[in-house]
Image: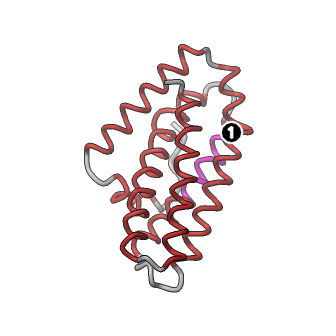
Amino acid sequence: MNAVELLISQHRNLESKLGDLMTAVDAGASARTKAVLAEVGDDLTVHISSEELVFYPAVKAHRTEDILMESLEEHLSLKRLLADLLALDPGEDTFKPKAKVLQEQTEHHHEEEEENLFPKVQKLLDPKELDKLGGEMQLLQQRLREDGDPRAGVAAETGEATPLL
């Protein structure tokens, strides 16, 4: 699958699940909130990991460094929010505001990638390269899911932004 198409599809999926998370929070459904947060956490973690480990390094050489550096800082912010949420009980006063900020920052990050980074990448890489990159990303994501709960390691990644390789 084309890497950009894969990422955009995952963006829509994450946005939908974040909406489900907010619905569960608003309903006061603690068990449902925890379950949806686990899904969001895993999906967000594998998505971010595949961008940081496969997609960003592959497109770095194509004069996208400024956009990529900003994206990595946004990833750090998302990881910190996710780690905070995973450590909180859904009934705590700060859970709902943090969940809302995670939703808003995720949507903002997706918008920036789709408006600024992806069009550049689509002009710089041919369809075969994008398909190859998408395949590599899917393999990494599959491996991360097979290794267990991807979200479990996010707290260890909140110290600083991942370096651009």
Q: Residue furthest right?
A: 115
Camera-side residue of 26 and 104 = 26
Q: Please give the name of the residue rendered at 30% of the width and 38% of the height, measured from the top-left corner.
A: 143
In the rendered image, residue 116, in percent from the top left (x then y), is placed at: 73, 38
Colour mapping used in the image: secondary structure
Residue 20 sits above or below residue 25 on the image: above
In the rendered image, residue 43, in percent from the top left (x then y), is placed at: 44, 50
Q: Is residue 110 left or right of residue 45?
A: right
Q: Is residue 9 left or right of residue 62?
A: left
What SS does tag 1 mark? Answer: helix
Residue 4 sits above or below residue 85 on the image: above
Q: Residue 23: within the magenta?
A: no
Q: Write the start and end of the magenta stretch as one range.
A: 67-77
Camera-side residue of 165 and 37 = 37
Disc 1 residue crowd, few under 14, some 14–19, many 20+, Cα 10 Å: some
Camera-side residue of 36 and 130 = 36
Camera-side residue of 60 and 154 = 154
Q: Please give the name of the residue rendered at 71% of the width and 28% of the height, measured from the top-left corner.
A: 120
Q: Please give the name of the residue rendered at 40% of the width and 58% of the height, measured from the top-left corner.
A: 154
Quarter of the view holding residue 138 = top left
Dominant secondary structure (helix, strand or loop) of the stretch shown in magenta: helix
Q: Please give the name of the residue rendered at 69% of the width and 28% of the height, measured from the top-left corner.
A: 63
Q: Residue furthest left?
A: 147
Q: Which residue is mark 1?
A: 114
In the rendered image, residue 119, in percent from the top left (x then y), is placed at: 71, 29
In the rendered image, residue 99, in percent from the top left (x then y), is placed at: 55, 69
Residue 76 sits above or below residue 59 on the image: below
Q: Is residue 76 left or right of residue 43?
A: right
Amino acid bearing label 1: Glu
